Amino acid sequence: MAIYEPGFLQTVLVYDRLGRLPAGAMAKLYFGGEWGMAATGRGVTFGLPPTENALAAYLDMLAGTELPWSVSVWGGDLMQTPVARLALERGGHLHIGLEEHFSPDRSPTNAELVCEALELCEKVGRPVASPSLTARLLGLPG
């Protein structure tokens, strides 16, 4: 589930409390990067910026739930923000790829972004989930 604003997460949490989320549900916390959704100019165009405090706000909202979550940055570079490492340290996951990525300073490939994520996982001691572990984390048969 794409969470672009804190209010989106409030709605998801109501469904979670009512037991109405399907197996496999995951909250994808999207932060607004420095270049916004369209990467046509500077300025966050939605939601919260990719900062420690913004992630802390979402995690306060998620406290007491078992809903898996990931982080991503639209119009920015997730791997160049504090949010990527903090998410891994706090039990979250990374949502990476060229779809969201924008940086005027570098143009990595998807493979390069995956390698950066793998290196960060190793640094913080988080193993990369196998397909069967991923299914288990999402409450799916695997």
Image: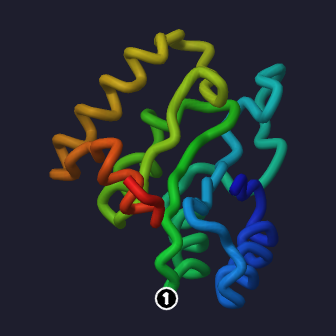
Residue sitting nearer the eye, 104 or 61: 61
Question: In the drawing, does residue 73 fall left or right of residue 63?
Answer: right
* Quadrant in the picture for residue 27: bottom right
SS class of the residue under badge 1?
Answer: loop
Residue 76, position as x, y percentages in the image: 62, 32
Q: Residue at x 29, y 47 (%)?
A: 129
115 sits to left or right of 37:
left
In this orientation, which residue lies closer to the viewer: 43 or 23?
23
Residue at label 1?
A: 64
In depth, the one of 40 and 25 nearer the eye is 25
Camera-side residue: 36 or 127?
127
Q: Mark 1 Cα within 10 Å, few/some/many (few <14, many 20+)?
A: few
Q: Position of residue 48 (x, y in %)?
A: 70, 56
Q: Is 135 rendered above or below residue 113?
A: below
The x, y position of residue 100, in whole percent, is: 65, 30
Residue found at x 73% / y 30%? 35
